[in-house]
Amino acid sequence: MKTIKLICSAFLMFAITGVNAQEEQQETPKPQGHTNQNKFRQLYQEFRDPSMYRTASGAPGEAYYQNEADYQMEIVLDDENTKLSGEEIITYHNNSKNKLEYLWMQLDQNIRKKDAPALEKGSSGMAPVAQPGRFADQYLKEPFDGGFNIEEVKADGDKISYTINNTMMRIDLPEPLEAGESFTFSVKWWYNVNNHVTNRARSGYEQFEDGNRAYEIAQFFPRMAVYNDVEGWQNMQFWGSGEFALPFGDYEVSITVPADHVMEATGELQNRDDVYTKDMMKRFKKAKKSYDEPVIIRTQEEAVEASKGFDKKTKTWTYKAEMVRDFAFATSRRFILDMMAVKMNDDSDVMAVSIYPKEGNPLWEKWSTRVVASTLESYSDHTFIYPYHKAVSVHAKNQGMEYPMICWNYGRPDENGEYSDRVKYGMIGVIIHEVGHNFFPMIVNSDERQWGWMDEGINTFVQYLAEQEFGERYPEAIEGYDKYPSRRGIPANIVPYMKGNQDFIAPIMANPEEVFQLGNNAYGKPATALNILRETVMGRELFDHAFHTYSQRWMFKHPTPEDFFRTMEDASAVDLDWFWRGWFYTTDYTDIGVADVKKYYVTDKQTKEGLELLERYGANPEEIDAIYVVEEGNEEFEEIMKGKSILENSEKLNAYVMDNFSAEERNSLEVPKYFYQVTFNKPGGLVMPIIVELTYADGSTEMKRYPVQVWMKNDSEVVKTIASNKEITKVVVDPDLETADVDLSNNSWPKEETPNEFEKFKNKTDG
C-alpha cells in the first residue's frame, strides 16, 4: 500500500541527493581506471577453487579422503629421573588416491632441545627491569636438555632409514605405499621431561615442596603428520605458537608409573579393577549414577597419605581410544579424583571428571566437574552430541591446554585456600575453553599449525555462549553479577586491540607465528566477529542452523577456512563475503558516526531551490503538480509550517490522497509532521549494519537497523531520510555497542562531549 511516508521520503531523497550527486559526477575529472575494490565483491581470488574433495557449498566432496594412523604404545615413566621412554607401533593407512614415497612424523618435543632454533626465534634485548627467576633461567642456568632421542625405527624387524629435520622426521619407505594400502612400523624413543612451571611448555611436570610431582604429559611420542588434498604433507615446523595438525586413528596405550599414582588419560581405562582400590571402585560405580553432584573417587586424605611415601613398585594403566587425533595423560600420587555423570541424550551418559592436587581446593572440588558437565551440555547443544565417553579436567599450575578427552587447566587458591573472583572466573573460563576444544579441533579437526583461529577463535566463541549458559545453570556461581563476566566475545572488549597500532596487528587469516598478540588475534577477535555475526548480522536462527551444519559436516574430518566460510553462507542464504573479507582478511575496524542531521518540512509554497531543480530538468512548475521541501531555519516558511502535518501544509498532497486513496487507506495512513535527513559517515574501514536509536521529544525511543548493503555504492557516507510524527531530539549509532565501534565520540547527535581526565576529576571534586 502506498503511504504518505514513502511518497515523501522518496521525493525528498531525490530532491536533496539525486541531482547533487549527478552534478558532482559531471564536474569531477575522469578518474583513472582500477580493479574492483568494492568491499562487497566476492572472495573468488582468496578462495581455493572447489573440487571433488571439497565442494563450493563447503561440504566434503564425493572424493574426500583422510589418511589414518593407529598406534600401539608401551610407555614407562621414570619418576626418579623425570624421564619418559616408549615404543610405539604405528599402522599408517593411505586412503588417498596417491602413491606415497615417504611418511612424515612430528617430533614436537624437539622444541625443548637446548639448541632448538625455536629458542632463538624472537628478539632478546636487555630490558631495564626483569624478574630474578626469569633472568636467572635465561642467563645463569644451563639450558634444559629436552627433545626426542630416537633409538630405532623398524619395519618387519628390519631397521629403516629416517631423517630428522628439527621438529619433523621423514620415514623413508622401503617401497612406495600405494593408494589403499597400509604400512606398519615401530619407533623406540625417550626424552627428559621438563618442569613446565620453570621451563614453560604445554606439558611436563610440576615439582612440589614435598618432593612429589604432578605430570601432565603430551606431545610425548612421535606422531604422524597430516597428508591431505590441500597441502599434501603438512610438515610445517613447530615453532611454538602454531599448534598441531594430526590424523585420526585408534590407540592402545599401556603406561607404567609408580604404584601409588592415580592417572587419567585419553581413552577408556581397560583395567580399572587392577589400578583402583576397592573403595575407589565403589565410589566410581556410585558416580556413574550421580547426575547432580560429583562423587569423590579418591579423597584428599588418601592423596595426602600417599604423598608421604615414594613407592618403588609400579602399576600399568591400559587405555583404548577409537577415532581420536592424539593422546595425553596426567599422573601423580598427589591427585584427588572426582566424577559425575552427564545425560547427553536418552541413549548415552558421559562422565565429567576432575583430577587435581590438594592445592586446587576448595575451588576445584566445588566447581571443576560441574563446569565440565555444563560445558559438554552447552557445546552439544550448539554443535553435535559429544561422542566420547568422558571429559577430564586436570589442574596444572599456569597451564591451559587441550587433548582428546583430557585437558590441563589453571586457577589455584592461595596457601590459605582463599581466591579472588579473577582466580575463580579464570579457572571456570579456562575449563570451559579447554573442555570445549574436544569439539574444536579434537573432532572438527582443523589445521592448528596453519590456522590458529579455526580452533581457538571458533572455540572461544562457543566458550562465550557456554559461559553465559553456565551462569544460567549455576546462578550461585555468578553471585554479584547479572551474568557471567566473560572476558572475550563481547564486542566492546576487542576495541582496544582493533584500534591499536596497525603495524603490530595482523589479519585473523595469518599464521600464528606471524602474530604479535595471539590472544587477541586468534582468540578474541574471531570470537567477537562470530558473536557479532550471530547477534547483529545474521540473527540467531540463521546463524545457529549454519553453525550446526558446519560442525556436523566436518566432525571427524579436516576442514579448511573456506569450508567454514562457504558452509555458513550455503546453509543460511546470507552473502557474507564482505564480512569474511573485512573481519578475517584485513585489519580494518568499525567506526560509524552521525555526520549531520537536518530537519525538513513539506509545503505547496514554491521555493527558490525547488524551482531551480525543476528548471534544471526542463519542467514548468505551472504545468505540474509539485510540492516543495524546506529545510528548518528558513524564516520565510517556518512559522507557517511548524507543528503541522504534511497534509495540513500541502493542499496538493491532501488532494492527491483524497483522490487516490480509499477511506480505509486514509484512516491507516501515518502522516508525519517532520522529515529528518541523517547523514552517516564511516571513518573506519569495516562495512557494518547501521544500528540507530532515535529519541523523541516525549522521551520515547525507537530503533532502526539499516542493512550493511547501504554501503554498497558509497563506502564513506550514507544519507537516510526519517519521516516522523514526533520531533527527534537525539540520534545515537550503535547504542548497545554491538559492532565493536572504536570511536564513540562521533556516534551521537547532538554531539556528546566526552570530558577529559582533568574535567572528570574536577567534576568529581566539585560534587
Image (cartoon, helix red, strand yellow):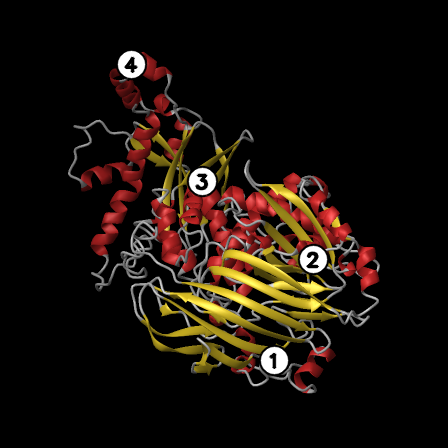
**Dot 1 amino acid type:** Gly
The location of residue 703, given as percent across then percent down, is 48, 36
Q: Secondary structure at mark 4?
A: loop
Q: Residue at x 60, y 50 (%)?
A: 390
Q: Which residue is mark 4?
A: 662
Q: Between residues 514 and 298, which one lies in front from this camera angle?
A: 298
Figure quadrant of the N terminus: top left
Tag 1 or tag 3, which sits nearer the N-term? 1
Tag 1 or tag 2, which sits nearer the N-term? 1
Q: Between residues 201 and 576, which one lies in front from this camera angle?
A: 201
Q: Which residue is mark 1?
A: 146
The location of residue 21, given as percent across then percent down, is 27, 48
**Dot 4 amino acid type:** Ser
Q: Residue at x 30, y 67 (%)?
A: 98
Q: Which residue is mark 2?
A: 274
Q: Which residue is mark 3?
A: 539
Q: Could you say which quadrant of the image residue 132 lies in?
A: bottom right
Q: Nearer the viewer, mark 4 or mark 1?
A: 1
**Dot 3 amino acid type:** Gly
Tag 3 or tag 2, which sits nearer the N-term? 2
